Image (spheres, rainbow, N blue to C red):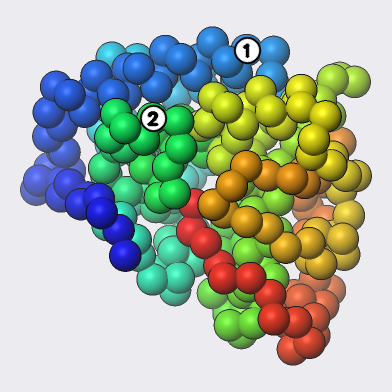
Amino acid sequence: MTKYIAKKPNANGYVGYIPEENETWQILYERQIKVIQDRACAEYLEGLKTLNMPSNRIPQCGEISEVLKAKTGWSVAPVAAIIPLEQFFALLADRRFPAATFIRTREELDYLEEPDIFHEYFGHCPMLTHQAYADFVQWYGENALKASKKAQSLLGRLFWFTIEFGLIQNKDKLRIYGGGILSSSQETIYALESDVPERLPFDIMKMLKTSYRYDEIQKCYFVIQDLADLFQLKSDKIIPLVESMGSESKGDDFVIC
């Protein structure tokens, strides 16, 4: 269940946000743009520059989609706050990134259990301007859509530890590419500078065997050396492996973020 109500676009795809909502975006944007400097990976920062999102208002879906289509063939799909898994996977497979059209309240600026439009636009969309990343996300959607329910829970771990909470080694410096981190001021700092979490080398088997919690700050991150590492996950052997493991594992509840 969700306490947020997504706004419906009009016939032209326009969503009318009230001044308070645009002000919330501005607060989040101006705070986060400072925090990500020297912490976000080069590909993310380049993508953020390419999108050129306004700082003082919530961008419209068409504005983001126009840039993404030109760069990687992706677009943004406005959705309700919570959507069925099958719809989520189908949208990714069709190179359409689902984004709920609500923005968090002022009381939940720092932590939000539900993905809002700031998380989707600021956290994820800059990386979708990078072809290797964008192709991986499409591959993920296509294969998750065809997978069994148990396998989907394990595939959720791959999504979580890469697309949501992935770290990358950029020119001998540890940086962030996961949208779940980059849309959170607290976790952006914590992921790189805290001595609490584990930062593990990229390992598919280890990733599949590592559970996660969506309701607290992360205790474990996986580090890739290059975005091309994600192509390892596109091997024909991965899905049969996940299916075989899914038959033996309880897995996690898949959380859409």
User: Outermost residue toward the bottom?
Assistant: 247
Identify residue for label 1.
37
Residue at x 66% of width, y 23% of height: 189
Residue at x 49% of width, y 58% of height: 256
Residue at x 84% of width, y 74% of height: 237
Binning the other alpha carbons within 10 Å of mark 1 as few (below 14), some (14 to 19) or many (20 upward) gives few
Q: Nearer the viewer, residue 2 or 49?
A: 2
The image quadrant that residue 250 belongs to is bottom right
Residue at x 72% of width, y 63% of height: 211
Q: How many marks?
A: 2
Kind of residue at badge 1:
Gln
250 relative to 115 in the view: left or right: right
**Residue 58, image x and y in percent?**
27, 27
Considering only order in the chain, which callout, 2 or 1, is on the residue closer to the N terminus? 1
Which secondary structure, mark 2? loop
Identify residue for label 2.
109
Kind of residue at badge 2:
Leu
Q: Nearer the viewer, residue 139 or 218?
A: 218
